[in-house]
Image (tube, rainbow, N blue to C red):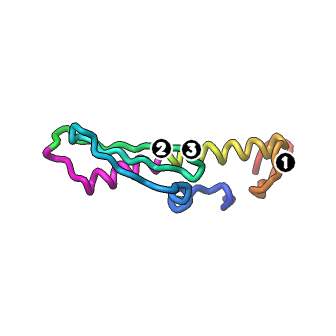
Amino acid sequence: MNPKTKLTPEGIEAMVESFTWTVLPSGRAMVCEAILLNGHAVHGIANVIDPENFSEEIGKLVSKRRCLEAVGDFAAYEVHNKINRIVLGREPNTLDLKIDDEEVV
């Protein structure tokens, strides 16, 4: 496995500049907003059926986890784009990929 293409929880969270949380007016949902280092905003939502069951602590944990899952999707997309640009010769091989005539190894 190439460590330069491996996504880790720490690496994904390092893409985030800041987190903020907002409880929606219904009292049934909490939104976590992550501002990425590139300025893009990503959101994760935690909600409950009954507002009496709402816990701010659990809402923060769940919404942050869901937010980081979305950040991970963006990170994976970027790695795939970078690999594609390297394979097509549009970018230097900064990932140290082993490329033969048929495939990326």
- x 30%, y 45%: residue: 30
Q: For the residue marked with disc 2, what is the amino acid?
A: Val
Q: Which residues are magenta?
A: 52-70
For label 3, the SS is: helix
Q: For the residue marked with disc 1, what is the amino acid?
A: Asp
Disc 1: which residue = 100
Q: Quadrant of the N terminus?
A: bottom right
- x 35%, y 42%: residue: 45
Q: Position of residue 72 (x, y in %)?
A: 53, 49
Q: Are marks 3 and 2 in contact (CB under 8 Å)?
A: yes
Is 61 in the magenta?
yes
Disc 2: which residue = 42
Quarter holding residue 81:
top right
Front one among 42 and 83: 42
Real-space Cα separation, disc 3 to disc 1, in angstroms: 27 Å
Quarter holding residue 51:
top left
For label 1, the SS is: loop
- x 56%, y 47%: residue: 39
- Nearer the N terminus, badge 1 or badge 2? 2
- x 20%, y 38%: residue: 49
- Nearer the N terminus, badge 3 or badge 2? 2
From this view, report whether residue 5 is shown above or below residue 80.
Answer: below
From this view, report whether residue 90 is shown above or below residue 58.
Answer: above
- Say which of marks 3 and 1 sits in front: 3
Disc 3: which residue = 74
Q: Position of residue 5 (x, y in %)?
A: 66, 55
- Nearer the N terminus, badge 3 or badge 1? 3
How crowded pointer 2 is (Cα within 10 Å; few <14, some 14-19, many 20+) is rated as some
Q: For the residue marked with disc 3, what is the amino acid?
A: Phe
Q: Main secondary structure of the magenta part?
A: helix
Front one among 29 and 104: 29
